[in-house]
Structures are given as structure tokens and as C-alpha cells.
Amino acid sequence: MSLAYRKVIMTSSSSSRPATAVLLAAGLGTRMKSSRPKAMQRLAGRPMLAHLIASAAEVFDRLVIVIGPEMADVAELAAPYPVVIQHERLGTAHAALQAEEWFGEGDVAVLYADNPLISSETLTRLLEARHAPDVGLALLAMRPTEPGRYGRVIAHDGLVERIVEWADATPEERAVDLCNAGVLCADAATFRRWLHSVKNDNAKGEFYLTDVVDCAVADGVRVHAVEAAEAELRGINSRSELAEAEAALQNRLRQKAMENGVTLVAPETVFFCADTTLAPDVLVEPHVVFGPGVTVESGVEIRAFSHLEGCTVQANAIIGPYARLRSGTNIGAQARVGNFVEVKNTTLGDGAKANHLTYLGDASIGAGTNIGAGTITCNYDGFFKHRTTIGDRVFVGSNAILVAPVSIGTNALVAAGSVITKDVPEEAMAFGRPRQENKPELGKRFKETLRARKENG
């Protein structure tokens, strides 16, 4: 049982009850003009469904995900939680009923994959409301800036009387600013009965989950609305709504980073992934993008226009400006990755430097090593990737080309402009370039020849 749910049952007047969350994720990406299921659309580098699973798993004892047919990618994302298939898309109440065998005892809440930003705190409050005396059904509601076509929650003295869809609402009802977010929570046995009683006598011939509210009111059950912020409860059905949700989530992630001791020089220009981990005293300059899988330790400076993904940056390193760190990269403490440097699947040792105009791929670079401007590790032969190994305190001169597989020993020196195709022993100096030859007076004669050609047309 999760700590969050323990908190719910300890503060509730009811006895300890298990809780199940049913996550509806069968929707197609039709309105988004996408071949990808709606649940797989990404926010902060993570599919919408993954956000919802993460929040729900903190609160509920059991999760079950309802998907559509031929949605293997959604099923894979849902693992290890069970999935059930809604073979015919006959509405949200019908979708929830597909998970009926997983309801068990206790309480059941139905959530939506296209409401991915609901926090665990809000879900905890939903369960607390459900456990209040005489409350048989709890739902989530919001007061959006522009209520638009949301269904209106008609309530009196804190109790819900009905939900009116915008198309059916009177002008007075449309003036109500409390809107339905669609999430419901009730006792499992009662919820099951209500779902079976929902009818499809509407224009679309679908079974709507919101009709459960009418069933509860008809039974004389008290229905309570739990209000939460629009930023959490907004539905996402279009590309523009996805962009709005991304903006809201980015603001949340930025605020969390700053609360945890991170300095964001221009917060509105920094973009995070949901799993970005920044320690206190990290400094992030403007226009930095974090892809999935980034961990940054204390004291690091990430300078402007840098892009990081799948990497670890250890304490007090300096990254950028205009640096790119790709998957599999580990930057050592006090190391330096400068402007226009790309690093992929590479370990850069403590205090090592690659200050500018360099590509380091599939390499291990020792502590205190200096990589000169324009250096390239040639790691790919057209079929296979090969590794470059560079020891501690090596000096690699500018415009060196290191053709992997190759190894450069500790304290070695590679002359600028060299092409290195063989291993370099420790303490050695490697010259991998042709001998320079100077031709006396040839430069003067060459220029004179060109000048004559120009004058003669």
C-alpha cells in the first residue's frame, strides 16, 4: 500500500479500504490528426498515460488500464499493470465496464489518459472526499478561465445535483463556472451497478460515464465535487490543447526546480523532461533543453543554448554554451565541455576539457586530459561502432582525427592535425601527418601566374 493511500485511510472516518484506479486509454488520435493513440502523445518527453500512471500509482493499491484494439504500444507502456481491451468504442461508461472484473472490493476511481496532469495530492483529496460521512460519489471539478463547452456542475450547499452538458444547458446553467473534469470515485459494488444502468439514448448512441452522477442522485446518494486547478484537470483532445498542457507542465517543472535550489536565469526559456533531476546549486542559463534521462549534480553550470539527454553531469562541471550531450554520456567532476562540442556515449574524466568544436563519440577519456579544438573520434566504419580510449593527462592537439579502435596512453601527446590510426604508448608523442615541405619562391610565382591570367581575361 502506498504512503499516500495510508494517509487517506488514516485521516478518513471510514475503515481501511483498498482502492482501484481504472485508467481509460482507448482513445484514438483522430482530432490530433495522428496515427499514434492519444494516450501516447508526449508531454515533457513522456507519454500522457505515463504521467497519469505515475500519479495514480502513488495513491491507489491497484491500477488497470483500458485500451483499444491493436494498441500494443499502449499495453507495453502500461506494464506491469493489467490491461483490458475495449473492442468497440461505445463510450466512457462502456470502457469502464470492460475493467469490471478488476474492481474488487473497496473504492473504484475512473481516470482518463487525456487528463494526464492530475497530481497525486488531488487524487488523495478525491479519496478523502469519498470517505467523508454519507458521501457515496466523489468527482473532480474545476473553474477554468474559459469554461467554453465543458459540462457544468450544478451544485447546492457543496453537493452536486446534476451535470449538464453545454449543448443541453440553459443560459443560466451555462453561466455556472464550475465544470466537470470527468473523474469519478465510488464504492466498487455500487459503481458497478450504476455503470450497468447507464443508457445510450443520446445523439451518439454512446454510454457516458457522466450519467453515473444522475444514477447516484436518483438513488438519493450524496455527490461531492472536489475542486482542483485547471492546469491539473484540463482535457487534451487537440494539438493546441497539447501545447497548452505542455506550457502548464513546464511551468510546474520550472517552479519545482527553483524550489529545490536550482537557479534558472530565464525560466521561461528552459525546457525539462518529466524525469530531469537537478541538484541544488545548479545554474541553468537561457535556452537550455533537457531531453529524457538527465541527472545533473551540484555546482554544475549549464550555459546558454545547450541540449542534454540521456547523460550524467557530475559536480562543478561546466557545459556549453552551445553544447550537446547525448545518450550514454558521463561528464566527470569539474570537467569542461565547451561551445559547439557534441559528446555521445562517452565518459569524460574528472577535470578533463573539450572546450570547442569537437565530436567525441564512443570514447573513454581520462582525468585531466585536454581535447583540442576540432578533434574528432571516428567511431563508425559504416557497419560497426568502435571505441576510442584516452588515458589520464593526455594532450590532444587541435584538428586531430582519432580513428577507432585506438588507444592513447597516459601522459601522451598527439600533435595538432594528426590522423591517429594506431595505439599511442604512455608518455609518447604521436605525429600522424605528412612531413611539411617548403618550396622556395613557389608562392611568389604562383601569385604572379594568377595575376597574369586575370589581366589577360
Image (spheres, rainbow, N blue to C red):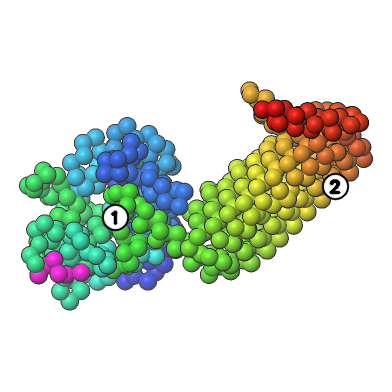
Describe residue 33's horizontal placement relative to residue 40 as left or right. Answer: left
Q: CA distance from mark 1 to mark 2?
A: 55 Å
How many numbered marks does the figure carry? 2
Q: Nearer the viewer, residue 310 or 358?
A: 358
Q: Amino acid at mark 2?
A: Arg
Q: Nearer the viewer, residue 112 or 453?
A: 453
Would residue 162 appear left or right of 61 to someone viewing this image? left
Q: Residue at the location (80% across, 36% down)?
A: 417
Amino acid at circle 1: Gly
Label 1 Cα neighbours within 10 Å, binned few <14 / some 14-19 / many ≥20: many
Residue that protrudes farthest toward the bottom in the picture: 157
Q: Residues within 10 Å of mark 2 (few under 14, many from 20)?
A: many
The residue beneath circle 2 is: 393
Q: Is residue 171 left or right of residue 177?
A: left
Residue 58 in picture, x, y percent from top left? 43, 57
Give the residue drawn at x 25%, y 38%: 86
Horizontal and vertical percent for residue 63? 36, 49
**Image coords of residue 89 (percent x, y):** 21, 39
Location of residue 131 (image quadrant): bottom left
Q: Quadrant of residue 297?
A: bottom right
Q: Nearer the viewer, mark 1 or mark 2?
A: 2
Residue beneath the point at 66% across and 27% down: 457
> Is residue 386 depicted above or below 175 in this figure?
above
User: Which residue reaches farthest front?
Assistant: 456
Q: Earlier in the sequence, mark 1 or mark 2?
A: 1
Of residues 260 and 412, the one drawn nearer to the viewer in this rendering: 412
Residue receiving disc 1: 235
Q: Taking 393 as reference, is 88 above or below it?
A: above
Specify whether 406 is left or right of 430: left
Q: Which residues are magenta?
A: 172-177
